[in-house]
Amino acid sequence: MFFAVPPGVSFCRFGTDFAIDLGTSNTCVFAHGHGVVLNEPSMIAFNAASGVVEAVGTDARNMLGRNPGHLRPVRPIRDGVIADFDATEKMLTHFIRKAHRHVRAWVKPRVIIGVPSEITPVERKAVRDSAVRAKASEVHLIDEPMAAAVGAGLPIADAAGNMIIDIGGGTTDIAVISLFGVVIGRSVRVGGDAMNDAIVQYLHKRHSLLIGERTAEAVKIAIGSATELDVPLTMEVKGRHIGKGVPRKIEISDAEIREALGEPLKVIIRAIRETLDAIPPELSADIYDRGISLCGGGSLLRNLDQRIRAEAKLPVQIVEDPLSSVVLGAGKMLGDDALLRKLAIH
């Protein structure tokens, strides 16, 4: 999903340190002392003939599904990790320069990047190398659920359990945190993108309608839900009829989209249950009292908190700023070296 940079944010005259939430759907950049200064789709478009970068971020996303043959939009982050090393480097370089546009080009920033909790050593190295090649002077990696917990203001230093679920575009990260550490962590490569894909496949199968990724996301935002709605919703969807090959418009209901989202939601619920089953008894008692915190763009699916509450039999609340909790948490570490040393992945 794309969400605009908050109003009033300035891009000029700030320091050189950045926190980055390198997400499958969006990349957020936090500048030390200035807050979130950039939030754009994790996308880059190349000229297929010359290899030249034609557009990055919002401009690249606007081309998706409408691009001529010589333009190739690429999403370099898939399932929360780097799928295209070269494209990620170029995209990161562009975003850092855009956020740092008023500082001399030779000033290299210190960078903190949030990564999924079950990222492999090879994938961690790919993230570090991309940031270094994008001219970062230092690169520190932080578990996304830990960064989200810091950004949400959870008491991670307490000798008590705090459970947070970060539902992003490519992954859902689940963590139980106590004493500055992840006691139980789980990551499943299902998130907002899998929901979009499920909607595409449902309309293909049930209505012989072919739609694109952007349309599927618009449908999810407009009428998607995790439980039955008090007031039913409908939406007109335009696409291409598969058999006839002509443009077609249909009306779909929230009940149909809820059916389409059934499988990815089952995977997320199953992962939550498995994590709860693995928690030590003392921490289980803490979570019973404190509940579960939800963040990430996927947490904004209608009634998802209610669905998890019913399935887990625990209190569930969406954090104050679910879209920015990871980058805000990583941003706090830019000004707290002691906290960074405790939480950085080595």
Image (spheres, rainbow, N blue to C red):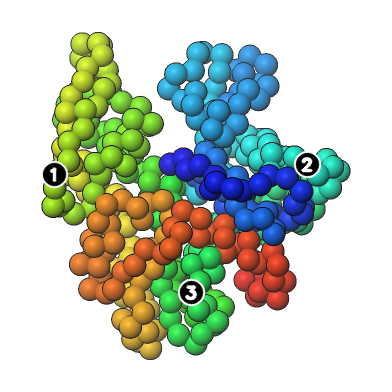
Distance from disc 1 to disc 3, alpha carbons, whole Å, reads 35 Å
Q: Is residue 260 left or right of residue 321?
A: left
List x then y, in percent, for residue 133.
Answer: 75, 43
| Residue 340 visible in the displayed image | yes
Distance from disc 3 to disc 2, alpha carbons, whole Å, reads 34 Å
Residue placed most toward the observer, 154 or 122: 154
Distance from disc 2 to disc 1, alpha carbons, whole Å, reads 49 Å
Amino acid identity at mark 3 = Leu
Q: Residue at x 68, y 44 (%)?
A: 11
Of the two numbered discs 2 and 1 on the same chain, state the one appearing first in sequence: 2
The quadrant of the image that shows the C terminus is bottom right
**Quarter of the rendering containing residue 317:** bottom left
From the image, tell me which residue sits under label 3: 154
**Quarter of the rendering containing residue 286:** bottom left
Question: In the rendered picture of this protein, how many numbered marks are placed on residues?
Answer: 3
Amino acid identity at mark 2 = His
The quadrant of the image that shows the N terminus is top left
Amino acid identity at mark 1 = Pro
Of the two numbered discs 3 and 2 on the same chain, state the one appearing first in sequence: 2
